[in-house]
Amino acid sequence: MTSPTPAQARRTLAELTRCLSDYDPDALTVEQAQAIIEDFVAPCCGAERVAIRAALDRVLATDVISPIDVPAADNSAMDGYAVRGADLAPESPQRLRVIDTALAGQPATQALRSGEAIRIMTGALIPVGCDTVIVQEAVCVDGDSVIVPGAQRVGQHVRRCGEDLRAGTPALRTGRIVTPADVGLLASLGIPEVAVRRRLRVAFFSTGDELRSVGETLADGQLYDSNRYTIHALLRHLGVEPVDMGVVRDEPQALEAAMREAGANADAIISSGGVSVGEADYTRPVLERLGEVAFWKLAIRPGRPMAFGRVGGACYFGLPGNPVAVMITFYFFARDALLRMMGAVPRQLPFTRARALTALRKRPGRTEYQRGVLAHGADGTMEVRLTSSQGSGVLRSMSEANCVVVLHHAQGDIAAGDLVDCIAFDGLL
């Protein structure tokens, strides 16, 4: 479906990795692998115009320019009384006669003169001659007059024309993923449709003769394929168009056929399984015939066997077979790459520092991602405990967790009470 972008056409993965110092395709650090992926991927989706109701979670293809000033005119930020600042005294209260009322959509009909005030509601246009609003709770009403206390600030509670947004300036920038608030903003500007990137097509499949789909009966030695369902959910959450290619048998011919089909019909390919030691014996030749591979293994746990490369014009992510490792490698390597291909601007995942409630064993020389539960401690600081099991095949550990504890490459053992970096799942997608 896709052809290499100009950046990809100029620079192959082999050329890119040849320039790297300490490049070892069998033991890359997290930072090295992420840098290779970032340098290689590029936006590949054209633009289309959609109604703003259909723009939610889509990536803006161009800046959205405001056609109007926001607010369109000076208006009141509060319910109260519109007055002349010149009538107010710094110290003493002032009596002003109320001559009119201004409602939102129904401006006052009279211009203000010295010694007068106009009752005004939130959002109503500031009447002629007024420059200040006194909140209604601050005044005393006395017949047809109000008594305004001293110490009022001239210009207070007035929203000035264009103070939020000027006509002709960008309201939303290219690469932004449209949020519900953005849809409301577009509607407030009277914009009926916007240019967005077409949805990225991502083909995905699992490999393994032992895998069966949900609903099928398991024989001895077989298991249900959870990875395809996990990846499908991750892709839908990211806003791409997922293309489920099912389970591919452990045969070179079947794998090559699946790769060719995916490379011809998708922008990116994600497989799970088939890239660990032994399994890669037939995967590597297939990929080398159809494209190229930048790396096979990472210095991480879980997820050490992971491949990244190109099949035709599609980027390829070969994720491990273990369910937890699939999610970890997707979050920390595939996610940002897919966002870049969509034309979005990836947001860096925010670290939260938390106190470890128990000691954590860690070997320097690899990055470890452990599943944890973040919570506020009795003293109000953040603390984290690990879920009961950290096995890479225990998917329940991801379901129970609300964060990943990131133990960095050079770190060793962590003592109880030490601070560690955590990334909350709410910040991942």
Image (tube, helix red, strand yellow):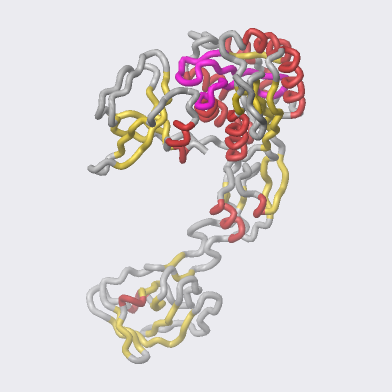
Asked if residue 134 shows in the view, the reply is yes
Q: In the figure, is residue 153 to the left or right of 311?
A: left
Q: Residue at x 45, y 65 (%)?
A: 159
In the picture, measured across the screen, residue 301 lies left or right of residue 314, that is left
Q: Nearer the viewer, residue 385 or 250?
A: 250
316 w.r.t. 373: above or below? above
**Residue under the point 51% across and 64% down:** 161
Q: Is residue 88 left or right of residue 344?
A: left
Quarter of the image containing the N terminus?
A: top right
Q: Residue at x 56, y 18 (%)?
A: 306
Q: Is residue 325 left or right of residue 136?
A: right
Decide which of 196, 212 is in the foreground and name it: 212
Q: Nearer the viewer, residue 59 or 283?
A: 283
Q: Position of residue 82 (x, y in %)?
A: 41, 77
Q: Residue at x 35, y 88 (%)?
A: 145
The residues colored magenta run: 296-325
